[in-house]
Amino acid sequence: MRPDADSAWLWVGPACNCRCTICPVDAATAPPGLVAGQIPRALQRRSEARREGDAGQLAVLVGGEPFVRHDVFGLLRRIREAGLLPGLVTNGRALCYPEARRRLGNAGLAYLRVQLFGWEESHDQVTRVPGSFRQTLDGLRALEDEGAAADASLDVSLALSPDTLADAPAMVDHLAALLSTPDHHLLLSVAGLGSGADHVVTLQRAVDALARWNHQSFRPLLVWEGLPDCLVTAPSHVARPPSRRTWSGVRSAPSATCLGDRGRPPSYPTDHCDACPARRRCRGVPFEGFVPRAADVPARSVIANSFNFVRQDVTLPLAPTPAACTADRAPGVDPARALFLAGDGELTLYRTDTGDFSLSEVSRVKHDFGHLYLDRSATAALDDFVDSIRRVAPDPYCDPCDRKERCGRRFREVDEPPFRREERWIAGWVHRLRGRILDVGCGEQLYRAQLAPLVQAGLVEYHGLDPDEAAVSELRRAIPQGRYHVGEIERFEHAAGYFDHVLCLRALNHVTDVREALSRMVALTRPLGTLLIAECVPFALLRNSGQVDFADRQPRAGHQHLRNWDSWEVAPFLRLHSLRTIYHRPVSALTNNQWVLHLLREGAPRRHVPQRETAT
């Protein structure tokens, strides 16, 4: 397990005398470290708190450098004897000694954080031991090869400076090669940032260069610490929020990871920060003069999830051969925004004038994924989207034509319902549910036919959660035996581990804070309970003008997404929790635009959620 807000951080000191800008404190301001006699009493208080319902289970030894104490292994043993799990934050040099690795393995370590204060000489200057950086890496390699801490959660933290930011990708590759499992984490932080434009550019380039690192599931999870969401825009960079740390045995102590001059770097909230939903867990931008760009966690401004190709009054006869086709010479055809649908002996022009998507995004939907659907409903209500739409696919007729990119290309309707297979699977899973269910974003519940009999028969205790009060009222009329809550999952409070199953069906891209939403869903799920998440990426509908007008007039037409993430962008957040993937159906050119994640909750709850219901 890894530290959470309720973990105990035990200051064992003494603080180092290097007076560096990275150590937690310096000797002049350090509180007295815990002495051996204080450890049992401090841990006893934590153990008693845990018996009273506190979910914190981890006690982490920090310094200074804990290994300067001759009794460090005795302290780890005392932690175990107190009923808590031991953790350790170290510069890692001691790992080069076989006896230290052996004794760490015997101590039953649950969490180990190895802090690198820089690369090569930069780390050695802080530790004041020449060659200590190489000793740490050799020790890490041996620790992994021997499996001495196989049961411990391992974090390797690297502090970067403006001078080393450009080399961050190579450093990350080097460290990842030392780690044996993707369950380990690589933590990157940045110290010494100035307000100059060159620092802004260098930092952004480093972030962008590693933006897709976590899309490879076999790699250790890469986490940026201390950077605001508006800088680390790629969701693959999961910025761990600052934890409320409890220090036992001393009245107060600073953070165990300090990255600035004599403490945390100053934060600079800007005018852009006030409306940001992430503001409560963000210290602000990292330096003066920084202008936030669009954040991963957006303000409550919505974005479109789909756009329309609208039927035009332009038809052409079907040509017998590609050479005889005149589609590329049809009037007013912009190949980037148009396509021709073949059917009933003629070609019909469809065109999009969307301003919600760039031309590259339109091309991605049209050409890369082919997520184009013909709306066959009479009104565009899409009450039964499984049977009311059909996919349109590129017509092989155009393949030999050297002019196909000049007309927008010809498409044909595919008769098979594109969502039937996935919807049958989800409906079947919902029908087999038993126990307590939390339905996040329940408003447009499409599986009422499966849920209602289960609720009426008492086989499930159904809880529906949605911020739309009107939608909740409609669902309450359909399934009156359920329990309903009006609000957002990020603020939903209930007993931890209460639910056997959590559903989040086409709702995740509507929540304001994905990180907080997933954290709460996991905390509310019992060990060995399941989470089922389904969501959609952008797509296009082929419609006539009447269908477009009808759709725009619907009450929920404004209920659009706050982001359009696919499952690979969500996966890094899931790896922060004890979740095992049972089934993953990502989006591709061979699938429809809906992805599915079926997850199993492992282990004990990580955090405590206040036991107070907010039913309406």
Image (tube, grey):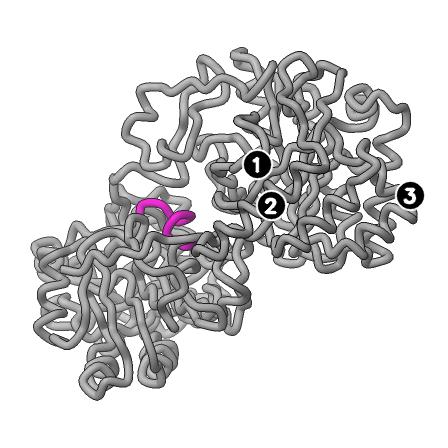
Q: Residue at x 13, y 60 (%)?
A: 616
On the question of residue 206 being in view, the answer is yes
Q: Is residue 539 above or below residue 446?
A: above
Q: Position of residue 463 (x, y in %)?
A: 24, 68
| Residue linked to disc 3 | 97
Horizontal side of 194 relative to 79 (left or right) equals: left
Sequence-wise, the earlier of marks 3 and 2 is 2
Q: Is residue 223 above or below residue 549?
A: above
- Give residue 525's quadrant in the image: bottom left
Spatial CA distance of label 1 from label 2 is 8 Å
Choose between 235 and 541: the one closer to the eye.
Answer: 235
Q: Position of residue 538 (x, y in %)?
A: 35, 55
Q: Are marks 3 and 2 in contact (CB under 8 Å)?
A: no
Magenta segment boundaries in residue numbering: 512-519
Provide the secondary structure element on which disc 3 rests.
Answer: loop
What's under tag 3, amino acid-wise?
Answer: Tyr
Q: Nearer the viewer, mark 1 or mark 3?
A: 1
Q: Which mark is residue 248?
A: 1
Sequence-wise, the earlier of marks 1 and 2 is 2
Does the magenta-highlighted stretch encompass residue 312? Answer: no
| Residue linked to disc 2 | 43
What's under tag 1, amino acid-wise?
Answer: Ser
Spatial CA distance of label 1 from label 3 is 30 Å
